Amino acid sequence: MLTKEEYIKNWAEKLSLTTDEIEGEFNKLLRDEKIIHTNLNEEQQNQRALQRLALTYKKQLRSPAVGFEGIIIGVSDCVDIVARKKREALELFRTDPVSAVGEGITNEDGIPLDDRKSWANGRPNNSYGKPLPEHNYMKNVFGIVVKSKLKDEPRYFSMVINGEKAADDNIPVFKPVRFMAIDRTSPEAGTTLYQLNASSFTTFNIDKKLQLPNHKEMITKYQGITKISELQAHHDANKTNFNRIVVVEGDVSTLRMEPISTGNRIMTIESADSLEDLDAKGLTCWMPPRINIDFAEGSKVLVVGRTGQGKVKDPATGQATEELSDITLNAFGVYPIPEYKIDLPDDIKPLKEDDLSLE
């Protein structure tokens, strides 16, 4: 019979968890056993806690999810993908209830319905004709990983997370992590990309014991870094792809810590060739509250995000013109390069994710 330590070590390897995490779960169950089974001796209580923990992990082992380890380089904004559909359905019912009900957009009480008969892959939608859920959150996660049990080359990965997990803004970015996910990589993706789906067991667990290459080296080799001067061409080629992502490197020239109405902070970065062209425009990066800014102006950073481009507004009327504005970047992750990082002054504190007030 294996010892407790041997069980924990085996489970950690199979489930891509850390031994500390499993030890913590075991201790919780052991405390529970000491309360509900006072008639058992200490050895029996320990054994019972192990058995209950094994039952929990067996569920995970039956899942098609497998273990991955590496880094997350970016997390997109959380989007409620039914919010717009519900608004449009309610508006149609208000203006044309006959069409709304007849087309299956709402029921006779004006409740928005799921009108998709099938999914994109052709499979029938079992929720067709049923009321839309209150919310359906979604976000994208991007990173570089290897399968825990393989010694293959790392790959860039993208993964969609749905439901309440998508509403979590505490996914660790640029930290060594282990997690479970379902590998849906198509043969056409080759050997440089993982297409992953989240499962009910997908949690991103920091494991400082992981031995990972330098973050910039990993990104350069397995994802690529785009020059600021090349962003317009990159955006033009990928603007119809909502899942587009790009990594740029630059020096922080301005950093506005005071959030605007959306909660974003504003950072401007400059390319390395700004020494030669002082008139060159910097890149505006929109920094959401979930990104921890623990570096100051003058730092060199990698910014991961999605490009955007709007229209120039007429200064007299405030109306959008047909002229395109400069490319901007919605930041999904920021990595201050350690050897070029400048710490924030002591009197400026990073904003916490749950506190947008200034100190």
Image (spheres, rainbow, N blue to C red):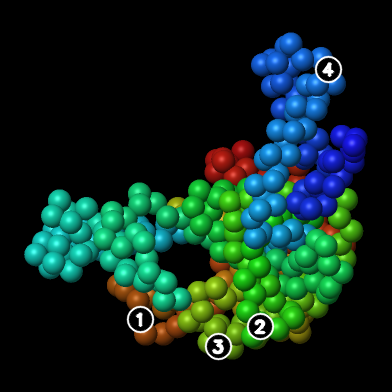
Residue 351: name its quadrant.
top right
Q: CA distance from mark 2 to mark 4?
A: 52 Å
Q: CA distance from mark 2 to mark 3?
A: 24 Å
Residue 42: which numbered mark, if any? 4
Q: Are marks 4 and 3 in contact (CB under 8 Å)?
A: no
Q: Nearer the viewer, mark 1 or mark 4?
A: 4
Name the residue nearer the viewer: 10 or 99.
10
Residue 7: percent from the left, percent from the top? 85, 41
Residue bearing mark 2: 187
Q: Are marks 1 and 4 in contact (CB under 8 Å)?
A: no
Name the residue nearer the viewer: 343 or 57.
57
Q: Nearer the viewer, mark 4 or mark 3?
A: 4
Residue 349: percent from the left, percent from the top? 68, 43
Residue bearing mark 1: 321
Residue 21: which numbered mark, if any? none
Q: CA distance from mark 3 to mark 1?
A: 23 Å
Q: Are marks 2 and 3 in contact (CB under 8 Å)?
A: no
Q: Is residue 347 left or right of residue 264?
A: right
Residue bearing mark 3: 237
Q: Are marks 1 and 2 in contact (CB under 8 Å)?
A: no
Query: In the figure, 31 relative to 192: above or below?
Result: above
Q: CA distance from mark 1 to mark 2?
A: 44 Å
Q: Is residue 160 left or right of residue 321?
A: right
Q: Residues within 10 Å of mark 3 (few under 14, many from 20)?
A: few
Name the residue nearer the viewer: 51 or 346.
51
The extreme top residue here reads: 39
